[in-house]
Image (cartoon, grey):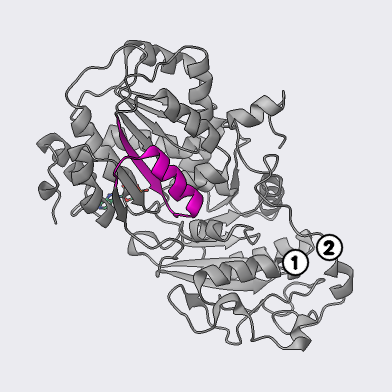
Amino acid sequence: MTFEELGLSPEVLSAVQDAGYQTPTPIQTQAVPYVLMGRDVLGCAQTGTGKTASFTLPMIDVLASGRARARMPRSLILEPTRELATQVAENFEKYGKNHALSMALLIGGVSLVEQEKRLDRGVDVLIATPGRLLDLFERGRILLADTKILVIDESDRMLDMGFMPDVERIVGFLPRTRQTLFFSATMPPEIRRLADKFLSNPKEVTVSPPATAAETVSQAVVSAPSLPKDKRAVLRDLLRLDEVTSALIFCNRKRDVGILYRSLARHDFPAAELHGDLAQPVREQTLKRFKDGEIKLLVCSDVAARGLDLPKVSHVFNFDVPANPEDYIHRIGRTGRAGRSGQAYMLATRDDRKALAAIQSMLGHAIEKRPHQDGQVQERAPCSVPQEETTRTTTAQDAAVPPNGKGRRSRRRRGGEAMDGSRGPGATRHAGSKPAKSPKSPADTAFGDDVPAFLLRQSPVPPAA
Ligand code: AMP
């Protein structure tokens, strides 16, 4: 299938050609004709599949005829984070360069004056995070009665971040007769229920089964001590051992992002941090420096880094084992993009046994261990996470061992032996340490300014850092 066969206008095709795309991706092949037809679409697709173009390209053509009225956007795209919203806006600019469509971006952290002026003049495309949109709506600055196309992107993430009540309210302000495009990387029952509620006779498009990791990503788990200081030393060793040209390092909590970033900087690593508490211009500048190769290591939270299009990430480090297995897929999906190979490491402590087992269960196979080099780090707390016997790294499609990684470890190992076979002196001391707090707590996730309205209503102050 070629782009020409999708039914797009010559102007859009010319912009696509200028973008350097040769052939449409599977989500584009499947979704574009239906969007052009005016059908609702339920798309199960991860970022990195060309999902954004699958709705922006046909939307540009659909919106090409018609005029926007003051404060009444003709289409609305909801995104869970500012970065994703900004990325979609960039896509519109790139693909819509041969059209005269007007666009506004409503996200936390940027001045609203200019955006409000644009809204007053009338916009064809409004791209927004739910909280900021509701804020403006409630102040009477915006009317959604003329919005004929609605895109709800990254729906599972919206749900995770607690935005769905806001999204449901927003949908209630839109006309019933509209076209709705609903995208999600995964399709758990709650997302399916919402899709049924928002969509009418949708065309379902699935481009990769939910919760599968790219085959180009080699994965390994490395035992790590529980003590943060020692765990950071293990990370530094990995950074030095491997050919790391550009890496994302994920922490579960944003305060740990700052701590790890400062520690790496103290050890002279070219690192920066990215989380929702940073001012928008700082976040943008950091991303630019990372994309330009000025910064090699970006320590980040899930929310801040979710869906970012960073094509040349050689490594992903899970400094913390994510509590939500699907976050693991999203994290490691930042590397191994566009057919390149990538390496993903996960540092696992003895407290991470359950979370690691859940990830392996979801993958359908164990992630193979990479022993930490003896003697490089004094391990104080040994690790006894589920593991495989072999030491080679694994790719996602390897399925050599049963789910959960269960049934392979001996009783002796359960007793607190480290993954690399050593038995550390801190075994008992750390055995009862508290498990990591769930990153779902509003206080711990990186909402930044994009806080769901219901949270703000419950408390007069924004969530703490
Ligand atoms: P997305 O899934 O929307 O985040 O897109 C991931 C990346 O794929 C972006 O860098 C796009 O510019 C790129 N892309 C989108 N469509 C195509 C295509 N048909 N061919 C090559 N690259 C594409």
Of the pair 41 and 251, the residue shown nearer to us: 41
Give the position of the C terminus as an image quadrant.
top right
Mark 2 crowd level (few <14, some 14–19, many ≥20, 10 Å Cα)? few
Seen in the picture, residue 80 relative to 233 is either above or below; the reply is above
Residue 68: percent from left, percent from top: 27, 17
Q: Residue at x 60, y 72 (%)?
A: 221
Is residue 366 left or right of 351 when viewed as pictured? left
- Residue carrying label 2: 433
Is residue 99 left or right of 129 when viewed as pictured? left
- Asked if the residue at tag 1 contacts the one at tag 2, i.e. Cβ–Cβ closer than 8 Å, the answer is yes
Q: Is residue 210 magenta?
A: no
Q: Residue at x 64, y 72 (%)?
A: 222
Label 1 secondary element:
helix
Is residue 418 left or right of 23 when viewed as pictured? right
Q: Disc count in the image?
A: 2
Q: Earlier in the sequence, mark 2 or mark 1?
A: 1
Q: Is residue 199 magenta?
A: yes
